[in-house]
Image (tube, grey):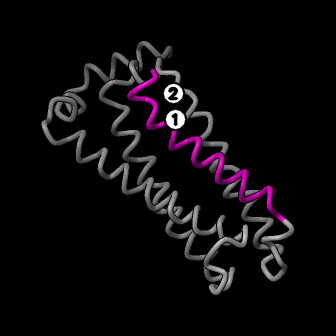
Amino acid sequence: MNLDRIWQMSYDSKTIDILRNSALGIPVIQSLHLIGITLLLGSMVALNLRLLGIGLTEINLPSLFRQAFRWGTAGLLIAVVSGFLVFLPDPARYAANHSFQFKMIMLPLAALLQYTLFRRVIVKHVGADVNRRFVLMPVLSLTLWFSVGWAGRAIAFLG
């Protein structure tokens, strides 16, 4: 099945048409999307800055790690589900947008790093002086997550 048929199915769907033509549907979903992004980025920034030794140093790393991952995962799930609902009413426009394409490349990379390598390194070395030994990991994590956020914001402006 080619993408044009999938896009057309979206445009022909009565359910999605209700969402597309609702005065409050997309704004409410976009608000949920921003809440998810805020939870995700807020928790990842707090954790990564702690790993860099910038702030929150009085909080022990295992506790902060558990909380940040819980809130970050919840935020990621909210952002992905609501983002999909924002995408559905006009998929062809989003799919042709270079900023959206970049975001869709960066999002799985950021999530993959965060939930595999990053997690493994932090869990393995949770008692060590992580902020001195693993500077690259939090810098890479922040770069990827903020790239996702900036690309998402650029969708409306850059195309």
Q: Is residue 103 magenta?
A: no
Q: Residues within 10 Å of mark 2 (few under 14, many from 20)?
A: many
Q: x%, y% of residue 7? A: 38, 19
**Helix, strand or loop for disc 2:** helix
Left or right? Give the position of 32 relative to 159.
left
Residue bearing mark 1? 151
Q: If the image is split into quadrants, where does the C terminus sit?
A: top left
Start-end of magenta stretch: 134-159
Q: x%, y% of residue 53? A: 72, 72
Q: Residue furthest front?
A: 54
Looking at the image, which residue is at 34% across and 37% down?
A: 86
**Label 2 amino acid?**
Ser
Q: Residues within 10 Å of mark 1 (few under 14, many from 20)?
A: many
Q: Nearer the viewer, residue 20 or 30?
A: 30
Looking at the image, which residue is at 49% across and 55% down?
A: 76
Q: x%, y% of residue 57? A: 67, 81
Left or right? Give the position of 148 relative to 95.
right
Q: x%, y% of residue 70? A: 53, 70
**Label 1 amino acid?**
Ala
Looking at the image, which residue is at 73% across and 57% down?
A: 116
Dominant SS type (magenta)? helix
Disc 1 and disc 2 in contact, CB within 8 angstroms: yes
Q: Quadrant of residue 155?
A: top left
Badge count: 2
**Helix, strand or loop for disc 1:** helix
Left or right? Give the position of 17 relative to 124.
left
Q: On screen, 12 above or below 100?
A: above
